[in-house]
């Protein structure tokens, strides 16, 4: 595989904190939730809104030839976090056949994970003008597990600081692993 300088050959997801977090950083006036808390996805979306508004939390995705995917906390992190518990359950069962879908308008990409000998083959497809290069990569099971476990745990840690009421919302009971 020939990787050009500056390209990201390995797929990665991270939730980064730019500065020490405190709940007082949040401007509550910016929080206007017009959604009724009737399911886990709505609560996850609210948490991701708070992350975005805080200005201290950044969601990063990279790979398939692009060091920084154009993602944010408000929309893209919410769609990813919706899928993470099911992915973690599959990983726990040693089932590495799943799809992570960045379905929000603008991103519109999928990463398919499939066992391939002693590794996992990740295949990226795009529904926009962007083209992955390379289209597929191989990673170790441990690397993939770590990516999703770290993202899930960091989401809960940061949520505990910025919006503990939402992290402990009963709607997330089924979502949590």
Image: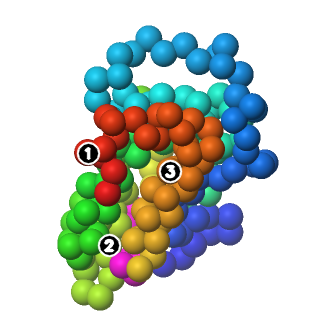
Query: Range of the magenta residues?
Result: 133-141
Q: Can residue 124 be seen in the rendering of this structure? A: yes
Q: CA distance from mark 1 to mark 2?
A: 29 Å
Lower position in the chain sequence, tag 2 or tag 3: 2
Labels 1, 2: front one: 1
Residue 174's disc number: 1
Q: Residue at x 56, y 45 (%)?
A: 160
Callouts 1 and 3 close, C-beta under 8 Å: no
Q: Nearer the viewer, residue 48 or 72?
A: 48
Residue to which mark 2 is pinned: 121
**Farthest bottom residue in view:** 118
Across and down, in percent, residue 25 comes to 75, 32
Relative vertical location of residue 89 with respect to residue 94 in this rendering, above or below:
above
Relative vertical location of residue 148 with respect to residue 3 in this rendering, above or below:
above
Residue to which mark 3 is pinned: 156
Q: Nearer the viewer, residue 14 or 165?
A: 165
Q: Residue at x 68, y 64 (%)?
A: 6
**Disc 1, SS:** loop
Across and down, in percent, residue 60 comes to 59, 51
Q: Can residue 129 be seen in the rendering of this structure? A: no
Callouts 1 and 2 close, C-beta under 8 Å: no
Locate residue 143 relative to residue 92 in the image: left or right. right
Graded by Cα atoms within 10 Å as few (under 14), some (14 to 19) or many (20 or more), the crowding at tag 1 reads few
């Amino acid at each position: 595989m020939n990787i050009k300088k500056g390209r990201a050959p390995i797929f990665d997801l991270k939730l980064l904190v730019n500065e020490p977090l405190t709940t007082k950083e949040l401007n509550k006036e910016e929080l206007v939730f017009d959604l009724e808390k009737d399911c886990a996805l709505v609560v996850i979306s609210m948490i991701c809104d708070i992350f975005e508004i805080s200005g201290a939390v950044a969601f990063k995705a990279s790979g398939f030839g692009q060091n920084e995917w154009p993602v944010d906390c408000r929309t893209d992190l919410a769609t990813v976090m919706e899928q993470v518990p099911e992915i973690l359950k599959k990983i726990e069962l040693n089932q590495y056949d799943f799809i992570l879908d960045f379905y929000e308008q603008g991103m519109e990409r999928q990463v398919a994970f499939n066992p391939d000998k002693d590794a996992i083959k990740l295949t990226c497809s795009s529904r926009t003008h962007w083209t992955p290069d390379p289209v597929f990569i191989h990673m170790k099971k441990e690397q993939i597990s770590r990516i999703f476990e770290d993202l899930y745990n960091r989401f809960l840690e940061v949520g505990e600081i910025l919006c503990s009421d939402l992290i402990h919302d009963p709607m997330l009971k089924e979502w949590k692993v």
